[in-house]
Image (tube, coloured by chain):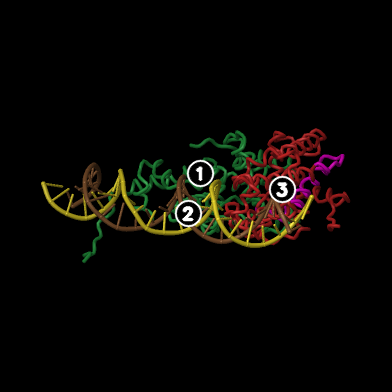
Chain colours: A green, B red, C yellow, D brown
Amino acid sequence: MTSSASRPPRRDAVDNRAALLVAARVVFSRDPEASLDAVAAEAGLTRRSVYGHFANRDELQREVVGLGSRRIADALEAITHPDPVVRLALIGAGIWREVEAFRMMALTALRGSLRSSTTAGLAPARARVLEAVNQAVASGAVRDDIPVERLARLVEDAALAVLEESTRSELSVRDGHRLVMLNVLGVLGLGWRDAGALIDSHAELAWKELS
Amino acid sequence: MTSSASRPPRRDAVDNRAALLVAARVVFSRDPEASLDAVAAEAGLTRRSVYGHFANRDELQREVVGLGSRRIADALEAITHPDPVVRLALIGAGIWREVEAFRMMALTALRGSLRSSTTAGLAPARARVLEAVNQAVASGAVRDDIPVERLARLVEDAALAVLEESTRSELSVRDGHRLVMLNVLGVLGLGWRDAGALIDSHAELAWKELS
DNA sequence: AGTAAGTTGCACACGGCTGTGCAAGTTATG
DNA sequence: CATAACTTGCACAGCCGTGTGCAACTTACT
């Protein structure tokens, strides 16, 4: 029967699949409930052909979110500053940098109906946040009046709040970069002057234009 | 024709209407997209009779959200502490107290599809937050490195983050009361020790059992 | 050039929800 | 008690989205 060598998938089919994923990210970023019709149109395809690449809506959605999660997870994986507080600021800035262009989608992926799809992929990233919070608390640099797990989640929320703010008012990429760090450090218990000073005294925390 | 005295609405009809509003609050709190069938069932009525009280789904939803908004607005209206920082802590605690039982609904009312219905009703409450932030900044007690409008919104988000946290892990009403104040003060730029000390030194900020 | 892979444009069944009409019942209230 | 107010149950139309089947077409690849 199928002798053995299943012919490799066609070139344009691969492209179309990728285009669908991009389109889905864009469209779902505006409206997570958008129809497959809208996604297909954005990709320049037909709704019907979506089913040639994904079994159903759910599979497409999970694939999109999965890609996003891994992207963030990888970005945070690359952050390795010895000072846990600086690391947390970097993590905040990293989230902002990765996600700023897709705020809406990110927010609904993390809070809305897609939440369940993300938890798995983001688990390592969350673990790194928790680890940094733990070390920061142990070092005495941040508050210890809130359980670390809870504090770690509030730190995440602080980063998301800046995303939310950027959907409400104009927030330049650069301002967002600083604001996300300030907000994270504030939630961690640093006084605002200390937070500002810390940011200014670490070159790694300064805003860098994309290369 | 209707001579002039349109007979007053029946007693049970009034009750049912109220029951529907309560049911809607409960059901939509779990799932904002829930069907009218679900709401009617919760109220012990039929979907059909919902339309005897509300023209359509939207009207019901807006009525529910409107009630909630006014409730919060009224609660915040009653807060009149001279120290703006304490007032902001009280505002946080007030939001928590009013909304803690309906976190889900509140979150989707403030962020989800119902957002537009709330903005009007909450405008005065938001104005009070902004006013307090303004005074607090002017007094030098809180950070001035973030524009006040933005800071006011981040303060709101800080309160919402605690609501969110309470949907993720068990958070007693009492712990939430303190946490919401700590988080708000943290975002405002107070160091965590200062924030804790401030809360402990003001009797108004202490947790009080409901009378 | 020939073949398989992929796309398209129908059509359809299906499900869930909304909003309405109407006849038959029940209940409050003067 | 009589009547208007209210609820119920059912039926129906409509909308919008999903997922599938199939024949015709275009495109990539060998």
Image spot of residue A78 (x, y percent): 52, 50
Question: In the image, is residue B148 above or below residue A139?
Answer: above
Q: Residue at x 63, y 51 (%)?
A: A156
Query: Which amino acid, by three-letter code, is at mark 1?
Result: Ser
Q: Which residue has dot 1 on it?
A: A29
Q: Which residue has dot 2 on it?
A: A66
Image spot of residue A134 (x, y percent): 66, 58
Q: Quadrant of residue B151?
A: top right
Q: Which residues are magenta?
A: B77-104
Horizontally, residue B164 falls left or right of residue C12, namely right
Q: Nearer the viewer, mark 2 or mark 3?
A: 3
Q: In the rendered image, is residue A55 in sight?
A: no
The residue lying toward the viewer, choosing from A72 and B43, is: B43
Image spot of residue D7 (x, y percent): 65, 57
Query: Which amino acid, by three-letter code, is at mark 2?
Result: Gly
Task: Give the main secondary structure of the magenta stretch.
Answer: helix
Determine if the magenta segment contains residue B79.
yes
Q: Which residue has dot 3 on it?
A: B159
* Mark 2, other Cα within 10 Å: few <14 / some 14–19 / many ≥20: some
Chain letter behind tag 1: A
Determine if the magenta segment contains residue B124.
no
Question: What is the CA distance from the residue labelled 1 to the residue labelled 2?
Answer: 14 Å
